[in-house]
């Protein structure tokens, strides 16, 4: 059976600045493309998808279902992939599934670090992060990776079971560190929020193990594995926002700068977004 003869799974991720397109048959990767596109994802996503399908001798009709990362993450990036997934699925009646971004980061981390607390911390904006904790459980062979303090820790490479320690939340750096310290246990840190605030976490969580930059975003194979196990349906995937977008939080100043009444602008926003 060729790929053109069977339905493929398409996975889209725009939770952070790295835009990811993954396509596979079951858990077998067919192709994956990634771009660092902080501001140009809209111009890249659909043309890149069509080009990749063409190069593989495929068309949109080859896609049988779509999984999309629903958050938490960039308001603009999430809306881009969610609306694209919906636009592709509706005409063809394709089922969709939502994937958690923190789950994807944790699944990648757990392939290296067993049996302890994995804290996924992503950049939200200056001084603010998204975070979620997980525990992974399995046994296997070990290798060595550096801790924040420069020491090494043992890491394992077999499959695991992930158990969330808490739901995804938004927190200041101080709140994030305190939550991790309070929870206790051997700790692994991963994600863009750790990288962008490396000095802070190295000072306050000196014994925590920090995964290399490669783990700041999920591997295509990880996204495809999660998509393969996801539950699909025909309802639109709901975004996971855990804080208002910057424009909403700054609506009063934006409205005033444009000569509008802030109260009227806020009332209009509520009217337009009312379900």
Image (spheres, rainbow, N blue to C red):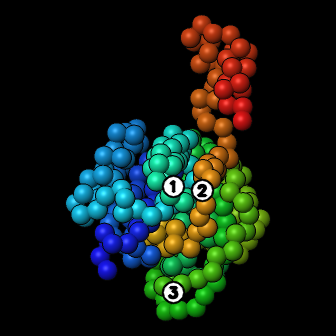
- Residue 243's x, y, as percent? 67, 42
On screen, residue 63 versus residue 174, left or right, reads left
Estimate the spatial distance between the alpha carbons at disc 1 and disc 2, rounded to whole Å.
7 Å
Which residue is pictured at 39% across the width and 43% down the height?
41
Q: Earlier in the sequence, mark 3 or mark 2?
A: 3
On screen, residue 225 versus residue 134, left or right, reads left
Mark 1 and 2 residues: CB-CB less than 8 Å, in contact? yes
Q: Residue 158 carries which label?
A: 3
Judging depth in this view, the residue of 114 and 22 nearest the camera is 22
Does 19 sit above or below residue 114?
above
Judging depth in this view, the residue of 233 and 104 nearest the camera is 233
Judging depth in this view, the residue of 174 and 149 nearest the camera is 174
Q: Which of marks 1 and 2 is nearer the N terminus?
A: 1
Q: SS at mark 2? A: loop
Estimate the spatial distance between the alpha carbons at disc 3 and disc 2, rounded to whole Å.
34 Å
- Residue 18's x, y, as percent? 41, 52
Q: Name the residue under label 2.
A: 234
Which residue is pictured at 67% across the width and 31% down the height?
273
Q: SS at mark 3? A: loop
Mark 1 and 3 residues: CB-CB less than 8 Å, in contact? no
On screen, residue 203 versus residue 55, left or right, reads right
Q: Mark 1 points at which residue?
A: 93
Estimate the spatial distance between the alpha carbons at disc 1 and disc 3, rounded to whole Å.
37 Å
Q: Residues within 10 Å of mark 2 (few under 14, many from 20)?
A: some
Which residue is pictured at 36% across the width and 56% down the height?
60
- Residue 31's x, y, as percent? 32, 66
Mark 3 and 2 residues: CB-CB less than 8 Å, in contact? no
Report whether residue 137 is seen.
yes
């Amino acid at each position: 059976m060729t790929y053109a003869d069977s339905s493929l799974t398409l996975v889209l991720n725009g939770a952070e600045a790295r835009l990811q397109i993954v396509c596979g048959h079951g858990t077998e990767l067919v192709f994956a493309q990634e771009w660092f596109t902080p501001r140009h994802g809209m111009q890249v996503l659909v043309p890149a998808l069509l080009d990749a399908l063409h190069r593989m001798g495929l068309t949109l009709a080859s896609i049988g279902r779509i999984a999309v990362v629903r958050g938490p993450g960039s308001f603009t990036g999430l809306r881009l992939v969610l609306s694209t997934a919906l636009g592709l699925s509706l005409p063809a009646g394709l089922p969709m599934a939502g994937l958690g971004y923190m789950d994807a980061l944790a699944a990648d981390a757990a392939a290296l670090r067993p049996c302890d607390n994995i804290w996924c911390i992503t950049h939200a904006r200056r001084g603010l992060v998204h975070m979620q904790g997980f525990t992974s459980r399995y046994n296997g062979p070990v290798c060595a990776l550096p801790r924040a303090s420069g020491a090494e820790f043992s890491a394992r490479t077999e499959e695991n079971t992930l158990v969330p320690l808490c739901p995804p939340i938004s927190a200041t750096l101080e709140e994030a560190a305190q939550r991790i310290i309070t929870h206790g246990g051997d700790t692994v840190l991963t994600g863009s929020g750790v990288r962008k605030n490396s000095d802070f976490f190295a000072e306050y969580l000196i014994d925590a193990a920090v995964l290399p930059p490669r783990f700041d975003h999920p591997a295509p194979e990880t996204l495809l594995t999660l998509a393969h196990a996801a539950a699909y349906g025909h309802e639109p995937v709901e975004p996971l926002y855990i804080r208002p977008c910057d424009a909403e939080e700054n609506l009063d100043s934006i409205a005033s700068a444009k000569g509008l009444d802030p109260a009227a602008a806020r009332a209009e926003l509520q009217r337009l977004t009312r379900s």
